[in-house]
Amino acid sequence: MALTKLCALLSVVLVLSSSTSVQGLVHYPPANTSITDLTAVLNGHGAPGIYNTSHTPDDEYGIYNWCNMPHVRKTEYKVPSKEYSLKYLEVIQRHRKRTPYASNTFFKEDITWDCTDEGPYHYAKDKSKFKTTPIYWQAETGTQNPFEYTVGPGFVNSTCQFPDITSEGLEDSKQHGQDFRGVYGDLLQFLPLSWEKNKYQFRVTNNVITTQTLSGFAAGIYPDVDEYFAYIQSDSYDSLEPALSCSLAETVVGTYQGPNTTWSSHLDLTSALSARFRNVSGIEPNDTAGWNTSWDHPYDNLSAKQCHSKPLPCSVNDTSICIGQEDANEIYRLGNWEYAYRWRGAENSTLYSTLIMGPWFKELQGHFKNHLANANQIKYYHNFAHDESISAVLGVLQIDEPVWPGMGSEIVFELWENTSNKTNHIRVLWRGQPLKTSTPLGTIDMLPLDTFLSYLNETIADDLVGLCASG
Ligand SMILES: *[C@@H]1O[C@H](CO)[C@@H](O)[C@H](O)[C@H]1NC(C)=O
Ligand SMILES: *[C@@H]1O[C@H](CO)[C@@H](O)[C@H](O)[C@H]1NC(C)=O
Ligand SMILES: *[C@@H]1O[C@H](CO)[C@@H](O)[C@H](O)[C@H]1NC(C)=O
Ligand SMILES: *[C@@H]1O[C@H](CO)[C@@H](O)[C@H](O)[C@H]1NC(C)=O
Ligand SMILES: *[C@@H]1O[C@H](CO)[C@@H](O)[C@H](O)[C@H]1NC(C)=O
Ligand SMILES: *[C@@H]1O[C@H](CO)[C@@H](O)[C@H](O)[C@H]1NC(C)=O
Ligand SMILES: *[C@@H]1O[C@H](CO)[C@@H](O)[C@H](O)[C@H]1NC(C)=O
Ligand SMILES: *[C@@H]1O[C@H](CO)[C@@H](O)[C@H](O)[C@H]1NC(C)=O
Ligand SMILES: *[C@@H]1O[C@H](CO)[C@@H](O)[C@H](O)[C@H]1NC(C)=O
Ligand SMILES: *[C@@H]1O[C@H](CO)[C@@H](O)[C@H](O)[C@H]1NC(C)=O
Ligand SMILES: *[C@@H]1O[C@H](CO)[C@@H](O)[C@H](O)[C@H]1NC(C)=O
Ligand SMILES: *[C@@H]1O[C@H](CO)[C@@H](O)[C@H](O)[C@H]1NC(C)=O
């Protein structure tokens, strides 16, 4: 173990109140990489991966592709030795590539997005009486409603929702479903059959883009099924989105992203880039919608375009002033650094991650337990979520090389039984391969289940509701 890690072992023992202590939580810093080292980010060149296509060449599969992250596929999958038998499978993944969020668009844009005949379905099912007609949404624009012209998003005459999974994003999702079936169906013969609906379960968040992503994935994994239901929790406590009320989480992140931190210095050090971006976007320097507190919005704005082979934007007032590729690349490096800092680099990022996705981990543990108690229960559970959900799961597990999880990012939890001595083991796959952590667990590859559960017990507070309220 490196010296820096030993130092970090001087544990962050948090005793916030007698009932809400997290006694065992230790932050193990991530590896020093071109993404976690701010100097390397500021002085670097090029994009930290692929940003302009969903296609990754086969001989490089596994590298970072923001538009379509690597996932398990037959060609790269490592089948464990014969003494192990797969018992339970749970997946959490990010949605697919999409149009930008309305909040991340410029007031006026110089390109269009077309979603004609691609809108999301919104209709009521009536099982008992009659078959209702599926209805989908299509944005209406160019109307006589004068208020239409007073707000963004600035994409003229667009038929899309912002956000919306695009048709290319749906194709990527279908391919993902086919690849997944290739491993857990064809290769391991583990997946339930499509009609065994009591053995598998899908779950989505309150943001419709996760349901849209599932609709593509389902067509790939079980093409013969007409209709599914997906679980969804109330938007007041949805643990998957996650949309939980946790004032301590806000306090904790507000402190390490506040004044006089590495976070504030990265903003100061990039003010020239920020001025160039403002010149093109027309975003005012006094904008309060988040454009000047992080690189998140510019990153989303530019990467959504490039992933769909659209050009980088130019100023609507002077088309000779545009965002250059080198500036875009720097924004992509900065976005990755920001995620790495928020979810892994900052000392309190592990605490923050447990406050954000701790409840979901409790559900995961419950699923393991249910399945071990009764093997006829659900054996494959698939969660469709967001970048923050994925980042916080990786934050809890303390990934060694953090990145901003790109489109379709997938984490697989495999529960295996050693058939010779009947012991249970965990393998976690990220980018299709066993996950390397900075913790004493090392790479989570056939770790005894109890070791894994003890780590979660030590790291995630028992009383999350009380702890959240204590902030
Ligand atoms: C990370 O590595 C770079 C170059 O390899 C080095 O200059 C820098 O000091 C390292 N940072 C830390 C925190 O170890
Ligand atoms: C995509 O970006 C890479 C550099 O990251 C570049 O070499 C390539 O030409 C670009 N492709 C297109 C179609 O723009
Ligand atoms: C990016 O931001 C600019 C400036 O606000 C806006 O004009 C544009 O519509 C946005 N584009 C995307 C793809 O979000
Ligand atoms: C938007 O639609 C209006 C009405 O159909 C049309 O006059 C205008 O040229 C369109 N604008 C763009 C940029 O396509
Ligand atoms: C982490 O957050 C807790 C709760 O807000 C705070 O008491 C503690 O000082 C923070 N630790 C660091 C290293 O900032
Ligand atoms: C930031 O640090 C400087 C010098 O270290 C200090 O003068 C200033 O009060 C600090 N500001 C805040 C908001 O903590
Ligand atoms: C902004 O654009 C103007 C031209 O309209 C140019 O003179 C100025 O240098 C640009 N500023 C930055 C920071 O790029
Ligand atoms: C274009 O000009 C208008 C009016 O002067 C201004 O409000 C807007 O911010 C400018 N947009 C850009 C991208 O500079
Ligand atoms: C962001 O905008 C606020 C409000 O105008 C301002 O106080 C702050 O200095 C700006 N921050 C940066 C990094 O530009
Ligand atoms: C931001 O500054 C511009 C002038 O530069 C002003 O017109 C606008 O009202 C200001 N917006 C806010 C939210 O203060
Ligand atoms: C069971 O077998 C596995 C694989 O050989 C081994 O790693 C593990 O330590 C064994 N566990 C017990 C309790 O014997
Ligand atoms: C984890 O904690 C729960 C409840 O606090 C306890 O029942 C369980 O035995 C613990 N598991 C491990 C492996 O420590």
Image (spheres, grey):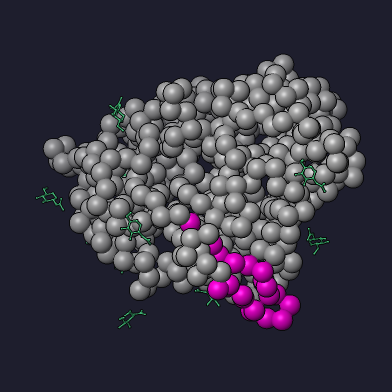
Left/right placement of residue 10 relative to residue 324 reads right
Q: Is residue 268 above or below residue 46?
A: below
x%, y% of residue 281? Answer: 26, 47
Residue at image position (36%, 41%) is 48
Residue at image position (28%, 40%) is 46
Q: Is residue 103 magenta?
A: no
Nearest to the observer: residue 60 or residue 255: 60
The part of the image, by quadrant, that contains residue 309 is top left
Residue at image position (62%, 35%) is 211
Q: Is residue 368 above or below residue 320?
A: below
Q: Is residue 159 above or below residue 454?
A: above
Residue at image position (52%, 23%) is 171
Instruction: Name the quarter where the C terminus is drawn.
Output: bottom right
Q: Is residue 352 above or below residue 13?
A: above
* Residue 304 appears in the picture as rendered: yes
Nearest to the observer: residue 199 or residue 349: 349
Q: Is residue 19 magenta?
A: yes
Left/right placement of residue 237 relative to residue 438 reads right
x%, y% of residue 67? Answer: 44, 33
Nearest to the observer: residue 453 or residue 335: 453
User: The magenta stretch spans which residues?
Assistant: 10-30
x%, y% of residue 426? Answer: 71, 44
x%, y% of residue 44? Answer: 26, 48
Count up the numbered dots: 0
Residue extending farthest top = 224
The part of the image, by quadrant, that contains residue 466 is bottom right
| Magenta span: chief secondary structure | loop
* Residue 140 appears in the picture as rendered: no
